[in-house]
Image (cartoon, coloured by chain):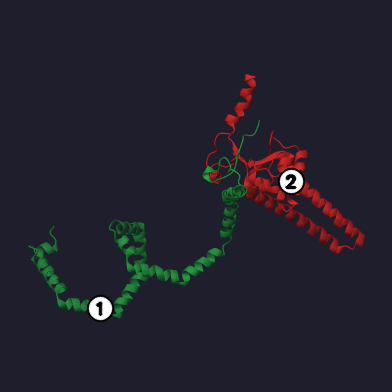
Amino acid sequence: MITVTAVAVAPTDSAPPRRYVGLVTRALAFGLDAALINAIAILVAALVSLTFSVISVPHEVTVVVAALGGAVYLIWTVGYFTTFWATTGQTPGNRVLRIRVVPASGTRLPPRRALVRFIGLTLAIIPLFAGLLPILVDDRRRGLQDMLARTVVIEAEEEEPGASARGGRPAPPPR
Amino acid sequence: MPSIGTVVDPFGLWSRASLAVLDRVLASQWANDALAITLRSALAERAVLTVIEGRLGQAALAGAIRTGLAERAAAELVDSGALARILDSDEMEELVGQVLESRLVDTSIQRVLAMDELWIVIDEVARSPAVTDAIAHQSVGFAGQVAGELGERSRRADARLERIARRLLRRRPADDDADGAGGAIAMPEPP
């Protein structure tokens, strides 16, 4: 019993506590991700459109390609978020804002829970972003997607010396 | 065997008298006027040109170079401080100004710019690892600075928005909100 307690305390002493990240920072990161996703999608769509503009295809084929494009866009968007969340925990937007999605317990988010988080994010956005409002009042700043996927969003580790200008005061001992 | 001079003028009186007369003549106003007239004449000009253009001039020039006259003159200019005075003078400033405004500078710059070697050197410098690294570091540093500033401002906005929301809902402020930075503290990640 004593041994178990010692193992549980050791990481607490070695790893400094980090802040949960609020709504504005997360919204900015999401905006950057959305811009990146759409920029790539628009580029690909433009290339496909150019291709179809010079060759003559039946109208039915165009409709099928458009539907296929929609599906690819959906897969691309879902894959973008779930892949980054399940691997590094950071989308490019998160990386710019130096935040990270981590499971509330454990070290890495399984892909299935990353997918749940994406679905939760979609559900949170549909009712005029009402599902994101809990971030403002929850003690761990969790939105609907975090509650469903059992995740939290925290500040990422410092990667550059002297980059602490963003953080405020040193963190107090963990509660 | 004694020389003729010793025989004719054993006490040197004649020689001394001749030199005294010569001194008198050279110191006279008549001699000065004669010299001035001579120097102003075309004859003097022709004489000088003849000396300069002739073998005598070449010999003098070669001798000056061989004996290091130019170096000695330069050293004397530096040691005596004359060079510093010349460089500080208004006349030198005027001279440099005229040189810079002359066609000489424009022509020189055009000739330098027309040189292929110059562009080869510039190309080499631009492609050098030191320069490309410096540019890359500057770009990355600037992007990081922008991201850091954006993150700092967004976190302040987080705290402000959260305080407003908690006040509206009459909930207690976040535990670490005493400094105004806002935001709850995350426990360390489990191992």
Q: Amino acid at mark 1?
A: Thr
Determine the image quadrant of residue A104. Answer: top right
Q: Is residue A161 above or below residue B96?
A: above
- Chain coloured green here: B
Where in the figure is residue B31, as x and y percent of width and height? 18, 76
Q: Which residue is mark 2?
A: A81
**Colour that chain A carries in the picture:** red
Q: Residue at x 89, y 56 (%)?
A: A64
Q: Residue at x 71, y 36 (%)?
A: A108
Q: Residue at x 11, y 69 (%)?
A: B20
Q: Quadrant of the C terminus of chain A?
A: top right
Q: Amino acid at mark 2?
A: Phe
How far apart are the alpha carbons under marks 2 and 1?
104 Å
Count of marks overlaid on the render: 2
Label for residue A136? none
In this image, A129 relative to B78: left or right?
Answer: right
Question: What secondary structure is found at the residue carrying circle 2?
Answer: helix
Q: Which residue is mark 1?
A: B38
Pinpoint the chain carrying mark 2: A
Question: What secondary structure is found at the residue carrying circle 1?
Answer: helix
Q: Residues within 10 Å of mark 2 (few under 14, many from 20)?
A: many
Compare residues A75 and B80 and report the one nearer the observer: A75
Where in the figure is residue A8, as x and y percent of width and height? 63, 26
In this image, B102 relative to B154: left or right?
Answer: left
Pinpoint the chain carrying mark 1: B
Q: Is residue B100 above or below residue A151?
A: below
